[in-house]
Image (cartoon, rainbow, N blue to C red):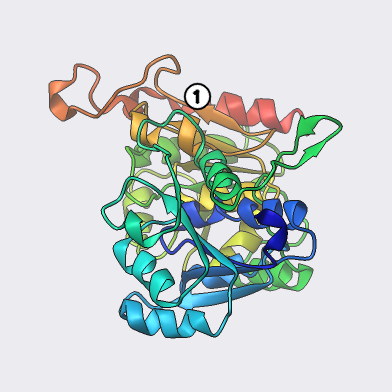
Amino acid sequence: MGSTLSNILLVRTDRIGDVVLSLPCAAFLKRALPGARVTFLAREYTAPLVRLSPDVDAVVSDDPADTARALAAKLRDGRFDAAVLLHPTARLAQALWLARVPVRAGTAYRLYSFLLNRRVRQHRKYGLRHELEHNLDLIARGLGLEYPSMNGERMAFPPRIDIPDALVASASARVGIPDREPYIVVHPGSGGSAMDWPLERFAELTDRILDTEAGIPNTGVVVTLGPGEEQLKGRLQQHLKSTPIWASGLTLPELAAVLSRAALVVANSTGPLHIAAAAGTRVIGLYCPVAPCHPRRWGPYGPGHAVIMPDPDRTCRGCRGARCPQYDCMRSIPAARALEQVHKMLATT
């Protein structure tokens, strides 16, 4: 079936990290189906980020306020051979059906899966594989494609975005980052999907990096804040002794540009961490041991990155809150441990 496909729609309309970890599907399709055109359906907020992918030919913005019928009318103009529902919702599945897309692939375990005609039996909630690998598996099985290989080995498809030099320069100037000054990005916020490293730990790490006597010489710190996280600045400043550079109010492409110039990014499990990895920057991710949030599924993908957990050998099926004797386990990760990892990774550049 795969060889007959030349115009394919990828559907992912949820959060930043999910979208970034779906971009490799476009690279997979380009390799498996040379000459194929790949279009990506994304929310208006994430669409500019998707446009930075070298493997995506076109982006369609989805307004969640549109009905399935209105979205279907928009998609029908694309004359797609196939669509892969990477983010399953009833509205999106109905829209693909109403748009009469000939091949509609997605997971098999939803009440609305009958609207799809290529149903893949795939469970993600147990966190046994990385989200990116689940996405590629859905593409391959849903569209009947062979997994591309090179020299007898399966090809790797890490996330990748290309950021124009002009955007890097303009975003750096907007934030106030001095030219050619190396810096480490600290991103203390998150999307609220996992337990976070406490703000006071991020503050202590920032202070220790910027310490004029014991810190990292000639290296600044840029604290990035995503949309809706501006209030974290005041809370973080309560714990800070040093003065980092603050970056907030940026578009996603501008944020990607700032992250791309960094020597390292230290962050919770959140979308900007995956943006940084896709932009070619090494990251240190701070993760809790709860199975749905585990780095086994949501960690930075690709070589050169690092993950810090309270206990790397422990996996909790769910967080029991205050009933757990190790509740708020993220607080047990000392800033010194993160700083040690920073030094280690900087030493291997």
Residue closest to the eye, 146 or 299: 146
Q: Which residue is mark 1?
A: 336
Vertical arrangement, residue 123 with respect to residue 281, above or below: above
Q: Quadrant of residue 212?
A: top right
Residue drawn 59% across the image and 66% down it: 50
| Category of crowding for the residue at label 1, using alpha-carbon neighbours closer than 10 angstroms: few (below 14), some (14–19), many (at least 20) | few
Vertical arrangement, residue 194 with respect to residue 67, above or below: above
Residue drawn 67% across the image and 63% down it: 5
Residue closest to the eye, 332 or 238: 332
Vertical arrangement, residue 154 with respect to residue 98, above or below: above
- Left or right: 98, with 23 as reference point: left
Q: How many marks?
A: 1
Task: Look at the image and tell me whether residue 222 can be seen.
Answer: no
Q: In the rendered structure, which amino acid carries the disc numbered 1?
A: Ala
Horizontal and vertical percent position of residue 125: 35, 36
Residue closest to the eye, 76 or 67: 76
**Helix or strand or loop: what does disc 1 sit on?**
helix
Residue drawn 38% across the image and 56% down it: 88
Task: Look at the image and tell me whether residue 338 can be seen.
Answer: yes
Residue closest to the eye, 60 or 228: 60
